[in-house]
Image (tube, grey):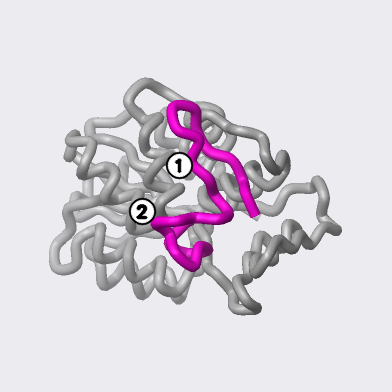
């Protein structure tokens, strides 16, 4: 079955361009021109991934992403004309898995889509494992995390980072290693965005994010799993 992509952009020319290209690449594509329509299609069409423009009429892309995250862990790639790092990190902080700055290469966007889709799917390895650390319980086969028995919704990127840190408990991973493992690619200027994903993870799984016990900062190097 082809993966279904929801393309959300208020410019018809961009939507049609993406639709034609992605369909030629083997995807099924549905479209929305505004945030409210996008939220409705997320519910009715159950897409595998959302390509979401930042600037939309009515609800903007950040608001739409935030509402999607309240109900679902569906991967979201933001399209933005904004180039300031703080704007990009804001998108990641509210739950976007990746961002692409306009003008963009269709080939690059498609590659990003494939990478994000791959990491959102349960892997074949260690399918039987259920890991318990303190109040945390991680189901590797179902990509689910529970804190004190309550489900904690993580984005695919957050789960990938947590899984990697758990896979070699105590080992220190650099930002670049985490970025490459979580996203499948790395490039200059993106490395510090891992800090935003780590911050989001801590807010979800740490009793006191300011004094974490699970995800430990190793200053000047990177992060390791504590617990």
Look at the image and give the residue range highlighted in magenta.
201-227
Judging by the rendered image, the residue that carries numbered circle 1 is 22
Q: Nearer the viewer, mark 2 or mark 1?
A: 2
Residue 50 appears in the picture as rendered: no
Residue 154, placed above or below residue 51:
below
**Residue sitting farthest toward the top:** 188
Q: Residue at x 46, y 75 (%)?
A: 44
Q: Residue at x 29, y 70 (%)?
A: 37
**Residue sitting farthest toward the bottom:** 149
Residue 21, placed above or below residue 33:
above
Q: Residue at x 47, y 64 (%)?
A: 204
Q: Residues within 10 Å of mark 2 (few under 14, many from 20)?
A: many
Label annotation for residue 54 = none
Q: Earlier in the sequence, mark 2 or mark 1?
A: 2
Q: Residues within 10 Å of mark 1 (few under 14, many from 20)?
A: many
Judging by the rendered image, the residue that carries numbered circle 2 is 7
**Magenta segment: does it hold 180?**
no
Q: Which quadrant is the C terminus positioned in?
A: bottom right
Q: Are marks 2 and 1 in contact (CB under 8 Å)?
A: yes
**Magenta segment: does it hold 218?**
yes
């Amino acid at each position: 079955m082809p993966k279904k992509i929801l393309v959300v952009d208020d410019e018809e020319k961009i939507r049609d361009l993406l639709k034609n290209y992605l369909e030629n690449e083997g995807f099924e594509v549905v479209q929305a021109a505004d945030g409210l329509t996008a939220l409705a299609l997320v519910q009715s069409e159950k897409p595998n991934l959302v390509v979401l423009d930042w600037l939309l009429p009515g609800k903007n892309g950040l608001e739409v992403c935030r509402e999607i995250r309240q109900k679902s862990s569906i991967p979201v790639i933001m399209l933005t004309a904004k180039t300031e790092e703080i704007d990009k990190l804001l998108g990641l902080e509210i739950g976007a898995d990746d961002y692409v700055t306009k003008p963009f290469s269709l080939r690059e966007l498609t590659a990003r889509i494939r990478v994000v889709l791959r990491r959102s799917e349960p892997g074949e390895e260690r399918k039987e494992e259920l890991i318990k650390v303190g109040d945390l319980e991680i189901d590797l086969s179902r990509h689910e995390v529970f804190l004190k028995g309550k489900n904690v919704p993580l984005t695919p990127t957050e789960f990938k980072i947590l899984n990697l840190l758990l896979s070699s408990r105590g080992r220190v991973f650099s930002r670049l290693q985490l970025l490459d493992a979580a996203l499948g690619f790395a490039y200059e200027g993106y490395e510090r965005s891992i800090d935003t994903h780590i911050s989001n993870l801590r807010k979800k799984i740490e009793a006191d994010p300011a004094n974490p016990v699970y995800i430990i900062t190793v200053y000047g190097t990177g992060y390791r799993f504590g617990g």
